[in-house]
Image (cartoon, grey):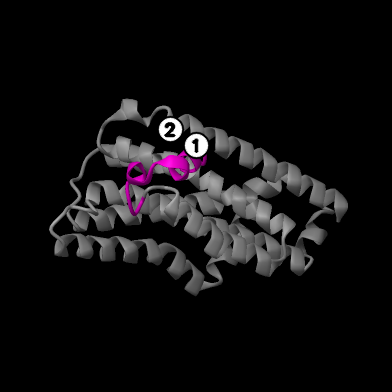
Amino acid sequence: MRILLFANRTTKEIVRDPLSIFFGLGFPIVLLLLLSAINRSIPVDLFNITKLTPGIAVFGLSFMALFAAQVISNDRVNSFLTRLFTTPMTSKDFIVGYSLPLVVMSIAQGIICYIVAIILGLSISSSMLISIALLIPPALIFVSLGLICGSLLSEKAAAGVCGALLTNLSAWLSGIWFDLNLVGGLFKDIAYLLPFVHAVDMGKAALNGQYSDIFPHIWWVLAYAILLSVLAIVIFKKKMKAD
């Protein structure tokens, strides 16, 4: 019950800034519309809607890290967390309470992204549901990164790392804009050591009904999600003791 109450409070804090919500939920849609328009204007099928949609859906999750970092850093600044540390809530309760609304928002964002893609010509199929469900593990990755940054950094620094830096990293190292095989070399090797391209690749495989191709990408994403979630709890617990 206390987790749900805290999650409800976190939701109110997030929606208190409608401009950020609009930007976080709307910017991936704008990109989808823009790249689809570009694709119709060029002779090659560079931004095919079937390949583009899973990538944009994953890219949109990067804004969840920014929301998470802003909420937790704001709570640190105004001493709200310090007061809550006197309650029976554990570090796990706090992390789940912060994460739950953002994971729900991630799913909502993914659904909106796919609805827009359908309007743009994406064929409706049951595979969409699986592709949307597979957004949950990468959502946990981004949310955990945001919570870690919000716990360790100042409000301004956390926003910078989870804003410009993380969104650009996830965009360029996930193969959304171009096929990583065209670049190859060290750039591709580094990209495949990180979870972003794996999240996109498993989303593409699910959308195309090629379920066997989800593996081994899902293992990479799940490993990062579990590791970063545990790390977020450990770091938050240490901050609780320090404060």
Q: Are marks 1 and 2 in contact (CB under 8 Å)?
A: yes
Instruction: Quickly name the residue at label 2.
Output: 217
- The answer to whether residue 225 is magenta is no
Q: Position of residue 45 (x, y in %)?
A: 18, 52
Which amino acid lies under the numbered mark 1 shown in the image of this protein?
Answer: Val
What residue is disc 1 on? 221
Which residue is rendered at x = 82% and y = 60% of the image? 82
Observer-nearest of 166 and 1: 166
- The residue lying at 67 percent from left, 38 percent from top is 230
The residues colored magenta run: 176-194
Quick check: 22 left or right of 14? left
Q: Is residue 205 left or right of residue 106?
A: left
Say if residue 70 shows up in the picture.
Answer: no
Count of numbered circles in the view:
2
Judge whether residue 184 is colored magenta: yes
Kind of residue indicated by mark 2? His
Measuring from the top left, give residue 195's x and y in whole percent.
Answer: 49, 41
Image: 171 above or below 164: above
Q: Residue furthest front?
A: 185
Up the image or down, 17 lies above or below 8; here it is below
Front-most of 188 and 144? 188
Report crowding for label 2: few under 14, some 14 to 19, many 20 or more residues within 10 A (C-alpha).
many
Q: CA distance from mark 1 to mark 2?
A: 6 Å
Q: Taking 71 as reference, is 29 left or right?
A: left
